[in-house]
Amino acid sequence: MGAAFLMANSSIGPGFLTQTTVFTQQLLTSFGFVILVSILIDIGAQLNTWRILAVSELRAQDISNQLLPGLGYFLSVLVVFGGFAFNVGNIAGCAMGANVLTGVSFSTGAIISGAVALALFWIKEIGKMLDGFTKILGTAKIALTLFIAFSAHPPLLQAIHHTFIPEKISTVAIVTIVGGTVGGYLTFSGAHRLLDAGIKGKENLPQVNKSAISGIIISTIMRFVLFLAIVGVLTHGAILNNDNPPASVFYFAAGEIGFRIFGVVLWSAALSSIIGASYTSVSFFKTFHPVFQKNERLCISVFIILTTCIFVFIGKPKQLLLFAGVVNGLILPIALGIILLASTKSRIMGSYKHPLWMQLAGWMVVAIMSWMGWVTIQQSVLKF
């Protein structure tokens, strides 16, 4: 469950809140279809990845290097780049949340939040801390957002109808949302946590399946609850603030209390995402040399400090969060394709035979995300 909540919490960060709000404004109840497609892609990506890594007992970069020498370094660069982009956005989310709660400036909020994240990573029992902290934050986020969704009185039947039969479809929205929930480092966050906890090998596959599915369910509940809250306020005539769209949703639904709740949700979402992004990104190069393994906490600290500094000097959280989602969405088909190829090699997987239906589902995800990624690039989304 710790791995499930780490994956789910990493995917329910400030990018998720901002992306969901921006695209729900554009698509209204049809955004439910985007969520449905992203869930199916999540299942195809996560189940394949978690099972293959668990059976091989190798992290993604190591399994890639065994498939083709040097491929692991290439994958690591992609994933760490995506994680770095997202972490700057996560710091921005913490800054926005702290500003709502206490009124401090964005820069001050970012620095304080970065310091809190650093303190959490320097706690001695880091594994137990990660598991416990992510469970508490995940549960709190869902409960608070559920309260806002009820307060917003969304058009439930229309939202359900358009989830399956949409009026509008946006490939840009799908690529961005998938990238923000399962792209880049997010595909591997829970799987690497399981390996670190010693849950690996064929004998532990039932636990691996349960953990992956639990993570998908947790993030799916949060996605739909937030979507319903946004649709509710928009159908009741809310005009959202362009600089901080999600905050407007919570304020319109429940007034000043809702605004404060948003501060808690955003800050906790961003902080848990900082933990997930930093932990997973560093896990991608700590096996390359003993010095990284030995100084894991130091590497994580440098990662957090660098991303905090970049936000303090650059800013523009909304644009950055959307950009990070697209970047990670483009990384997904490359990363998943490498893992699927590795699953066919007996020298890597031993006697294990990866189920054919999972292979087919995985390659469908690779094909769909590659096509939609190409369409997204053609539409010049990367200009922001």
Image: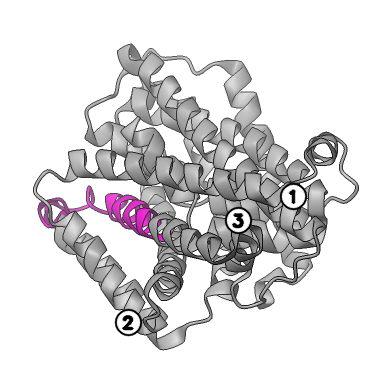
The residue wearing badge 3 is: 330
Viewer-nearest residue: 42 or 347:
42
Name which residue lies at 20% across and 44% down.
129
**Residue 96 in picture, x, y percent from top left:** 46, 73
In the image, residue 176 lies in the stretch drawn in magenta: no
- Mark closest to the chain's N terminus, 2 or 3: 2
The residue wearing badge 2 is: 108
Q: Indicate the amino acid at tag 2.
A: Thr
Q: Considering the numbered disc 3 on the image, is that residue within a helix, a strand or a loop? A: helix
Q: Considering the numbered disc 2 on the image, is that residue within a helix, a strand or a loop? A: helix
Q: Measure how far apart labels 2 and 3 are at the Cα level.
A: 33 Å
**Residue 240 in picture, x, y percent from top left:** 70, 71
* Viewport quadrant of the N terminus: top left
**Residue 373 in picture, x, y percent from top left:** 69, 55
> Please, what is the dominant secondary structure of the magenta stretch?
helix
The residue wearing badge 1 is: 371
Name which residue lies at 79% across and 68% down.
379
- Mark closest to the chain's N terminus, 2 or 1: 2
**Residue 28 in picture, x, y percent from top left:** 80, 54
Report which quarter residue 277 is drawn in. Answer: bottom left
Viewer-nearest residue: 220 or 77:
220
Q: Considering the numbered disc 1 on the image, is that residue within a helix, a strand or a loop? A: helix
Say whether residue 102 is left or right of residue 198: right
Report which quarter residue 225 is drawn in. Answer: top right
Name which residue lies at 72% across and 42% down.
368
Say whether residue 142 is left or right of residue 284: right
Q: Is residue 255 above or below residue 136?
A: below
Name which residue lies at 69% across and 46% down.
228
| Stretch in magenta | 270-296
